[in-house]
Image: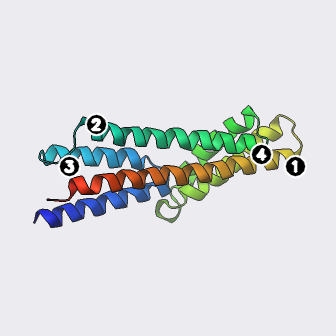
Amino acid sequence: MATVLAAAFIALLLAVLVLHLLSLPANWILLGLVAVWKWTHPAMDAGWWFFGLLAGLALAGEIIEQVVQIVGGKRYGSSGRGLLGAFIGGFAGAIMGAPILFGLGAIPGALLGAYAGGLIFELMHERPFVEAHRSALGNMYGRILGNVLKLALGITMLVLSIPRIWPN
């Protein structure tokens, strides 16, 4: 019975990673669920160091996501205003896209929003369209890479948690 329960819980954790597609804090939810497992299964071999590691990975995912978007935008010539527009646009796009396709519209919404926000803010400050378009593409590429890296850290969190959840 313990094996079936552990397998179901690991499947739940795997399903939580899908929340990245909705631009939701999947890594933090995964951390919370593993903490609940520890609370309900005190014999779990996980202490403060383990949960500190998971929290560090979740925090690193958030930081990396933002830094990579900034670096991507800067590499393609984005200004601070364009980066701000991309951040606002990405957030708004994720929210507006969330109701589409049972929530799967949040990812294209965030990506298109990052592009549109960066483009609009650059054009509002009288940059030529070609430069504004290039910087907006950089913002979008950075957003894509940031999301992929954040998902990779979530997968790492899951892989580290599985042996501690699985019954001996």
* Label 3: how many Cα within 10 Å (few below 14, some 14–19, many 20+): some
Task: State whether residue 76 is above or below residue 112.
Answer: above
| Residue displayed at 22% across by 65% down | 7
User: Which residue is tagged 2?
Assistant: 49
Q: Amino acid at mark 2?
A: Trp
Q: Secondary structure at mark 4?
A: loop
Q: Is residue 112 left or right of residue 123?
A: left
| Residue displayed at 28% across by 37% down | 49
| Residue displayed at 56% across by 56% down | 107
| Residue displayed at 35% across by 40% down | 53
Q: Are marks 1 and 3 in contact (CB under 8 Å)?
A: no
Q: Earlier in the sequence, mark 1 or mark 3?
A: 3
Q: Is residue 55 left or right of residue 103?
A: left
Q: Amino acid at mark 1?
A: Val
Determine the CA span between mark 4 and mark 3: 44 Å
The N terminus: image quadrant: bottom left
User: Which residue is tagged 1?
Assistant: 130
- Residue 136 percent coordinates (x, y): 74, 47
Task: State whether residue 94 is above or below residue 83.
Answer: below
Q: Amino acid at mark 4?
A: Tyr
- Can you tell which mark lies on residue 37? 3
User: Which residue is tagged 4?
Assistant: 76
